[in-house]
Amino acid sequence: MMLPIRKIVSDCIVVFVFASFLAFLKPFGMHNVSYLYAFGFWLVMCFIGYALYAPAIRVGDKAFAVTFANFKYRQWLSLAFSTSMASVLLGLLAPFIIGLFFGTQNDYWSSVGSSVIASLFIGGFITFVSFIKDYVKAQHVLISEQQQKITDGAASVKNDNVVKFMSKLPLEKRGKLLCLQMDDHYLKVFTDNGQHLLLMRFKDALCQLEGFSGFQTHRSWWVAQDAVRSTKKVGRKLVLILENDLEVPVSQTYLSSIKHTLNLD
């Protein structure tokens, strides 16, 4: 799958900046070379490196996503492995590129080792910066999306407590509020992005959600009204089926009010 044009342009800007910086530093004995000549060399090296690193990282990410699906540091492991493999390939090509700019070297294999090390250091640093750039951008997008979901979910309620309540959840769990379940001194919060356990009293949560379109169904359950997909009877008891397939019991205490709210016979 090809990278989006905006992603390619963004990466090329990073590569261009690093090529300019390396040309200014003139490392590896290049102090006698003019800036423009050094810039041309590093520009070629960096863009060839990008042509190797970018697909290697994509392939590595897909491979590790299957093999290490549940590993916490999968992305970092994939990045380290892919960068190392791409650095070896660039290290094998580097002596030829150096030869084009500065003359053919006598011993190709003796220069490969130092080229791989240099490629790993420079390519790894550029890859790390690019990864952090993409990560920060993705976090900004995630925060924006989750904040919008919170705002949409609380749109009908002019109460900042609702937003404050949802902000207690981690970013990846924020979304459309479905229901709450009391669990001893904890509170299970269910959203369309999963569930999270909060150290919070059930009655305190109900106070914060006062005015939100929802209702208590049981002494330990609260449900958002628009989360109810259907209902069913289990014996004489009513059970609400939510959009996440969770089944919530309805006690006799709240049965009549819930039937009236949901227009049930």
Image (tube, rainbow, N blue to C red):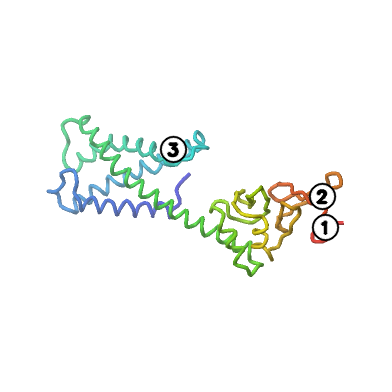
Q: Under tag 1, what secondary structure?
A: helix
Circle nearer the viewer, 3 or 2: 2
Furthest residue toward left: 32
Dot 3 or dot 2, earlier in sequence: 3
Q: Is residue 25 left or right of residue 225?
A: left
In the depicted view, which residue is nearer to us: 98 or 117?
A: 117
In space, the residues marked 1 and 3 are separated at their CA atoms by 54 Å
Pinpoint residue 101: horizontal percent, then vertical percent.
Answer: 19, 43
Q: Under tag 2, what secondary structure?
A: strand
| Quarter placement of the C terminus | bottom right
Residue on which the image places disc 2: 238
In the depicted view, which residue is nearer to us: 249 or 156?
A: 249
In space, the residues marked 3 and 2 are separated at their CA atoms by 50 Å
Pinpoint residue 139: horizontal percent, then vertical percent.
Answer: 47, 54
Q: Is residue 256 left or right of residue 67?
A: right
Q: Is residue 125 left or right of residue 247?
A: left
Q: Amino acid at mark 1?
A: Lys
Q: Name the image quarter holding residue 226.
A: bottom right
Residue on which the image places disc 3: 60
Dot 1 or dot 3, earlier in sequence: 3
Q: Is residue 144 above or below residue 248?
A: below
Residue on which the image places disc 1: 259
Q: Amino acid at mark 2?
A: Leu
Asked if labels 2 and 1 touch by Cβ distance under 8 angstroms, the answer is yes
Q: Amino acid at mark 3?
A: Gly
**Residue name at image x 47 percent, y 36 percent:** 64
In space, the residues marked 1 and 2 are separated at their CA atoms by 9 Å
In the depicted view, which residue is nearer to us: 34 or 101?
A: 34
Q: Is residue 9 left or right of residue 92?
A: right
Asked if labels 3 and 1 touch by Cβ distance under 8 angstroms, the answer is no
